[in-house]
Image: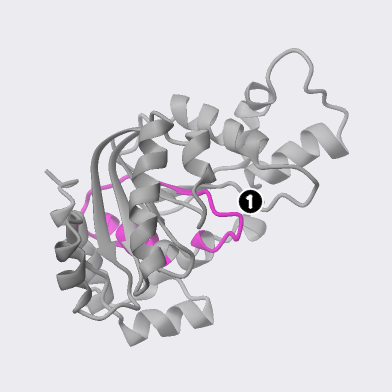
Amino acid sequence: MIRVVVVGRGGTGKTTTVALAARWLCDHGWGPVLLVDADPDQSLAEMVGADLAGTGVRTIAELLEETFIAGTGTTIGVSPSERIEARIWEEGLYEGVGFDLIALGTKWVEGCYCLPDAALKQALSRFVRPYAYLLVDSPAGLEHLNRRIADEVDVMIDLIGASKKSFDHVARAQRVADESHVRYGRFVVAGGYQVDPGIERRALAAGLPYIGRVENDPLVAEFTLEGRSVFELPPGNPGLASVGRLLERAGILS
C-alpha cells in the first residue's frame, strides 16, 4: 500500500487535491483507495460524494463521544482507542465505489484531539492492508504530525500558497515530521490551485523539491461552491488531470 499525506497551510486546497487524487486513482484502476479526513472541518466527504449522515456512518469523534461521554463507557483499563476499534470499522467506515472513507470528525466537547487522533492511528495501523492507496487530508496546523496519525508515509505533499508563510511552512512541516519520527520516503512540494505558474521559479530558487501545481479550474471551483462531488467531473477536466500529473511526478505510481 502507498501512503500519501497532504499537508499545508489553510486555504491552499488540500481537501480539493485529495479528492481529485482519489478520483484520478479510481478512474485509472489504482484502487481500492482509503481516504482519511483528519480535518475537523469535515469537507472531504462532501467533495467525494460520501453522505455520512444519510448512510448512518459515524465519525471517530462521534463514536468516542457516544461511548465515553453520552454512554457509560470508561477510559480505565483497556485503552479507549482499542475499546472503539471495532465500532470504527463497523459504524465509521463509508464504503464507496473504488474508495472507502473514515472521518475524524468535529469534537464538540472541551479538550484536545489527542483521543480521536489516537483512535484513528490505532485503527489505521491494523486495517489498511486491503487498500492500494491511503490518502490523508490533514488539518491546517502541524500538531497532527506530532501525534503521528500516520507514522509511516511513502510521500508527504506540502501544498504551498503565494505567501512567505506558506513557504516557511514547508521547513516547519519537515522539521516536525523529522523530530516526531514520522518515517517518510519522499517530501515534495506542490503549488495549490490559487498560485500562478510563476510559483515554480520561486520554489526552485528556494531549493524546494517542487513537482508542479494544481490547475485553477473554474468547473472544480464551481463544484466546490455547490457542494458537488468531484466524481461528477468530466474525465478530461484540467484540474483533475493536473493532480494526476502531480501523483506521477511524486513517484507514487511506480
Residue 196 or residue 61, whichever sits in front: 196
- Magenta range is 16-44
Query: 10 Å neighbourhood of mark 1: few (<14), some, or many (≥20)?
Result: many
| Residue name at image x 30 percent, y 52 percent | 157
Quadrant hosting residue 84? top right
In which image quadrant can residue 23 be found? bottom left
**In the rendered view, does 39 fall on the left or right side of 177?**
right
Instruction: Relative to 148, say whether 76 is above or below.
Output: above
* Quadrant assignment, res 236: bottom left
Q: Position of residue 172 (x, y in %)?
A: 39, 49
* Residue labelled with disc 1: 105
Q: Residue furthest top?
A: 77
Q: Is residue 251 left or right of residue 138?
A: left
Residue at 66% from the left image edge and 34% from the top image edge: 115
Give the residue type at disc 1: Gly
Q: Residue furthest left?
A: 254
Q: Is residue 21 magenta?
A: yes
Q: Is residue 140 magenta?
A: no
Task: Say left or right for 206 vs 157.
Answer: left
The C terminus - image quarter: top left
Q: Is residue 69 toward the left or the right of residue 93 in the image? A: right
240 relative to 146, above or below: below
Question: Does the image show residue 237?
Answer: no
Q: Position of residue 121 (x, y in %)?
A: 51, 32
Q: Secondary structure at mark 1?
A: loop
Q: Quadrant of the N terminus?
A: top left
